Image (spheres, rainbow, N blue to C red):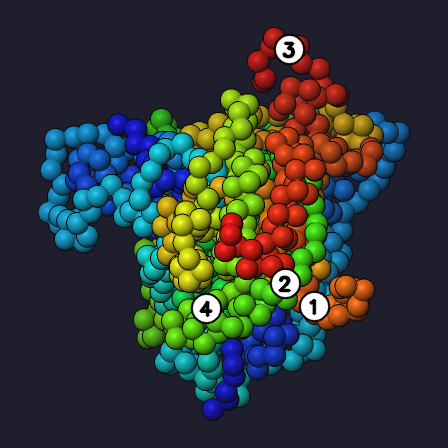
Amino acid sequence: MDFKLPDIGEGVHEGEITKWLVKTGDQVTADQPMVEIMTDKATVEIPSPVAGTVESLFAKEGQTVPVGTVIIKISEGGRAAPAPAPKDEKPATAPAEKPSAPPAAKKTQPSSPPTPVTQPQSTVATRATEREVSPAAERQVEVESTAHVLATPATRKLARDLDVNIGGLTGTGQHGRVTKEDVQLAYETHQAASPRTSHPAPSQALSVPGAAKQQPVTKGALQRIPLRGIRKKISEAMAHSKHTAAHFTYVEEVDMTEVVKLRASVAEEAKRRNTKLTYLPFIIKGLIPALVEFPFLNSALDDEKQEVVLKGDYNMGIATDTEQGLMVPVIKQADRKSIWELAAEITELSEKVRAGKAAIDDLRGGTFTLTNAGSIGGVFATPIINHPEVAILGVNAIRKRPVVKDDQIVIRDMMYLSLSVDHRVVDGADAARFMNRLVFFLSEPTRLVFA
Amino acid sequence: MKQFDAVVIGSGPGGYVCAIRLAQLGKKTAIIEREFLGGVCLNVGCIPSKALIYASSQYWKIKNDFGEMGLESKSTQMDIAKLQAWKSGVVNKLTSGVGNLLKMNGAEIIRGEARFVGPKSLEVKTKAGTEKISAHDFVIATGSRVSEIPFLKTNGKNIITSTEALALAEVPERFVVVGGGFIGLEIGTLYAKLGSRVTIVEAMDQLLPSTDKELVTVVEKRLKVFGVTVMVQTKVVSLEEKEPLKAKSLRLTVEGVTGGKKAIEADCILVSVGRKPNSDGAGLETIGVKLDPRGNVITDQQGKTNVPSVWAIGDVTGPPQLAHRAMMDGLLVAAGINGEKSYRDYKTVPWVVFSDPEIAACGYSEKELVERGVKYKVGRFPFAASGRALSTSETDGFMKVLIDEKNEAILGVHIVGHEASNLIAEATLAIEMGATAEDIIRTIHSHPTLPEAFPESIEAALGKAIHIFKPASRKPV
């Protein structure tokens, strides 16, 4: 029977064959692990569905194959596997070592933001064993011939030097030619996944080749890094949003002096509660009555049905910067939570996401998104809408500025708010009115008592 | 005891290249040579044979071919003594060049016979006595020597090896070559052109066994023009020395595969039935270096033997026994000794036969591709369609290319024709670089030159050659 790369987890469309555990001609028993696949979530062993003889392998190690691709052909035979039962190696019963994300609807919802990376341990372990066998210092070694590989001698030499199995690479050149860049990339991907790498912490955390932002950069060398995993998701989601939504960004300033005072006044309380209280909970508190008043800003556009979906919930997505890339955990039913609850939840979710431990449910269901560009710097940013939501609020830095108040120049804690909106759903005037409402509450937070 | 980082045993093309590179890499290097610098290749192989082959070809052309161009030279005489002197001059220039290069790069030349006494030490018997040498790494580059036939012991006079055949003082009248491999073919052709009546006896079913038959046919046809008798599927069974019949006359009895014995009279017999490795005599057994059943030193793809610190390169490690392969080995092993990750991972070793016309090939043969189940396309370009070949009156032969049907990579190139030895270089580069049909076609080849045959034959494989017409319906030849 032809065996296809199975669906190995929600949102996983492809997997890299990291290691074949069987070869052509091998007898396999049912459930015997036959291949190791690395996805953007985890490395899993795929067991054989039947007992029989391996007829042929259709994918090479190092090759990335889409889910549903035939990867192996096993002829079902009654013949029992010979003496050493592979069972004792590792009893694999489940079809896959499940990633921590619970399985969900097959069709990925466009609204679900990039899913997190689960523990890369298994990947690391595999790579480590591979490395141990390769370099033999003094003894004779047999290396695979590279005669069949479409690559120049210099490229093949580079592969030798870097211990890259060039035969296992899929070239990016014409006719599958393996280029120097392909080899370099394979090496760096390997390095990133290897625990022995000399690179310090940041790169060790990387098990996803696509996490380009922290890739070790070799000075002067041209590098090609494939978009994979979270980076690929971000790229797709952002481009889709930009191409689909009719973005415009409306910027207003808000006097945050009162909020700053309010926050300072509860500093002791925050300490006592051991809660990290940022300005975000206050801003969410100000947003809720404004969103209630302007429900179209808390909606989604169903492109297919051409319907605006007004959301009954107020689930706030918080754009979070992680080593893997942008992630958006969601605070559910923010309208029903206290400042303290919001603060605690923001801390908890961001820690989870940064550790790569967020569950898929932590990352979906948002109705409106906030992005805190101001924590790093800048006057204001023009955020990209988390499509199919229709609005995203850019929260910028609070800075002391001289402002005119009651014909006096005074020093106030000022902040710009930049609101990107899908003009297909919300017009500029409504966006401005919505913003006025938000400013109304934030500039005088006591007003929230009556909201 | 003298101590070195690396010691190379044998100064043939593999050994001297290895030693020079080792010295360049900053290794304290010695090279041990028992006979002459440059080994077989420079002294009694490639270089002297090519000198004589060239001269004999010119002689033949002057006497037989130039007439059609209106160049008459009936009085041309050959002075074999002068020819040999010229040849020796060429050899001397090259061997002294090798010596100078070794010295200038800082490698120490030790003349004598080496013998391992331990995995990291050996003794060299020199004129002055026995010298003990130790080193961190050793490279066995002892080469190969002519294989013998028990009842056809060579005597250096009228039963000879290629070595003597390249230094004959006179042209034998009846010259019999036993073994139709490339050495026998080259030397047989050379003497035929100088006036000998040549017979080549080969046990297999064709000259140059394992060479594409299509190529050999062109050479066999030409051999007839030189008056060479080719006896294939024929074995030598006995030798009779017939002193009284004629001075130095020999009678060789041969037997065809279908039976039927035949006697061949000869004044001189060249035994060219292959070469065997010089893996004996250097004490390899003392240190336990593993050999295969044919006596070849077993090495891995880095050139390492089973004994750490001992490496081996070139002919002593078995086929292909070619100087250029040994040279590449030398470079690879020097890099390996230097701690680099250096492997024999070339895609092809080209080979050349300086027959008339020349044969050269690289990459896969059709037979190999069929065995491997690789689907391929074939394209041929006959030199008769080449402007350059016509204008030099060298129109025999053709170029044949084998292209991967899947990705159009060049898989093999086989050439029979004038200058095949030079033409193969581009083809080898193409294969090493992983060039595809399109790469070659899109490379401008200067006109009028023989290399134009390369893109032309590829176009032919793709069914769109410009200079040879082939009706679309007809299957490629």
The percent position of residue B138, horizontal first and vertical second, equals: 47, 74
User: Residue B400, image x and y in percent?
Assistant: 61, 30
Q: Do labels 1 and 3 touch, CB within 8 Å? A: no
Identify the mark at residue A296; answer none if there is no mark: none
For the residues bearing labels 2 and 1, Cβ distance under 8 angstroms: yes
Question: In this figure, which residue is indicated by the disc labeled 4?
Answer: A276
Q: Residue furthest right?
A: B70
- Badge 4: chain ID: A
Q: Could you tell whether B202 is left or right of B184 in the image?
A: left
Residue A256 disc label:
2
How many neighbours does mark 2 have within 10 angstroms: few (below 14), some (14-19), or many (20 or more)? many
Q: Is residue B29 above or below residue B358?
A: below
Circle 1 crowding by C-alpha within 10 Å: few under 14, some 14–19, many from 20: many
- Which residue is painted at 78% across and 36% down in the image? B445
For the residues labelled 3 and 2, the Cα–Cα distance comes to 83 Å
SS type, badge 2: loop
